[in-house]
Image: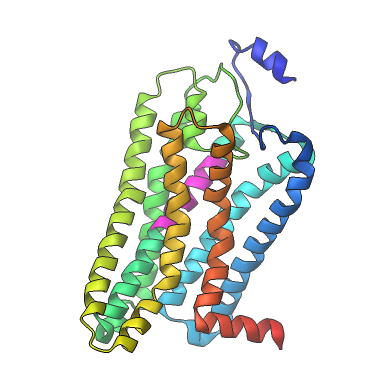
Amino acid sequence: MTLGSLGNSSSSVSATFLLSGIPGLERMHIWISIPLCFIYLVSILGNCTILFIIKTERSLYEPMYLFLSMLALIDLGLSLCTLPTVLGIFWVGAREISHDACFAQLFFIHCFSFLESSVLLSMAFDRFVAICHPLHYVSILTNTVIGRIGLVSLGRSVALIFPLPFMLKRFPYCGSPVLSHSYCLHQEVMKLACADMKANSIYGMFVIVSTVGIDSLLILFSYALILRTVLSIASRAERFKALNTCVSHICAVLLFYTPMIGLSVIHRFGKQAPHLVQVVMGFMYLLFPPVMNPIVYSVKTKQIRDRVTHTFCY
C-alpha cells in the first residue's frame, strides 16, 4: 500500500500505523542505521556490564549501587523496547505496525520511562540520606526498604500506564496513519484517532504531573536540602567530596528530564516546529539516557570505574 493510496482513502479505518524514519533522508536510512546500531550496542553492553559488575562484586551491595542496578535494568528494557521498530525502519523500511503491537510498545516505553523517573527520585533520596544523615544511612536504607521502594515504583508506573492501551483501543483510526517517530508514543497515537480525545489528553497530563512533575520537584527539594547541608560543612575539601558523590546522579537527571520535557513541550505546544526537530528530540529522549548513564557512572564513580578496568584490562 502506497502513501498516495493511503492519502486517498483517509476516510477508511486504518488497521495499521506507519512509523517514520528521518524525513528527507530516506535514501540514507541504511547508512544512518550504522551509528544507530552502534548506539544500541553501547547501550545494551554498557548496562549489562553495570549489572554484571554489581552482581559479581560483593562490595557494591550498597544502596547507591542497588539503585544504579535498577536504573541499568530500566535503561536496558527501554533500549530493547524501541530496537525492533527503529532498526526495522532503517534496515529494511518496515514501517507498518499493527494497532495491538503499537499499543503494547507504547505501554512498555512509557512504563519504563516513568519507572526511570521514580528510580532517579530514589537515588536523590539516597544521596540526601548519605549526606544529610550519614550516621543513619545503613539503618534507613536497608535491603528491605530498597526492595519496597522498587516495588512501589514499579506498581505506580504499571498502574498509571496500564489504562492507556485500552483507552486508545476503543477508538477508530480513520485519518492518516503516519506517526512522527520510529516507535509508538501515547501523545502521537492519540492525535490519529477519529474521536474526541479530551479524556485521554486529560489523563495523559495527569500521569505526567503525578510522575515526572512530582518526581522532579522532589529531586530539586532533595538537592536544596543537600546543598544546605554541604554549605554548612567547614572543610572545603569535605564539601567538594560530598558534592562529588552527586555529580553522576545530577548528570543522569539532566540526561533524562531535559529531552523528555523538550519532547513533551513540542508535542503539546510546538505544532509549528519542524518535523526533523521532533524526530531528533524523540531519539534523544529514548536513546541518550540508556547510552550515557553507564558511561557517566563508569567515569565518575571510582568503584565502578576500577571494576570495569579490572574486568576488561586484566
Percent across and percent down for residue 43 are 62, 61
Residue 187 can be seen in this image:
yes
Percent across and percent down for residue 99 are 59, 30
Q: Is residue 40 above or below residue 236?
A: above
Viewer-side residue, 107 vs 263: 263
Viewer-side residue, 291 vs 206: 291
Q: Residue furthest front?
A: 236
- Which residue is at 28% across, 55% downward? 217
What quarter of the picture does the C terminus occupy?
bottom right
- Which residue is at 22% across, 73% downward? 228
- Which residue is at 23% across, 88% downward? 234
Viewer-side residue, 229 vs 188: 229
Percent across and percent down for residue 212 are 36, 50
- Which residue is at 63% across, 23% downward? 15
Q: Is 110 included in the stretch rendered in magenta?
A: yes
Percent across and percent down for residue 232 are 20, 81
Residue 162 can be seen in this image:
no
Q: Is residue 128 above or below residue 286?
A: below
Query: How many numbered marks does the figure carry?
Result: 0
Q: Is residue 311 above or below residue 99?
A: below
What quarter of the picture does the N terminus occupy?
top right
Which scheme is used to colour this image of the protein?
Answer: rainbow
Q: Is residue 247 left or right of residue 109?
A: left
Q: In the image, which residues are magenta?
A: 105-117
Which secondary structure class fits the magenta region best? helix
Q: Is 37 included in the stretch rendered in magenta?
A: no
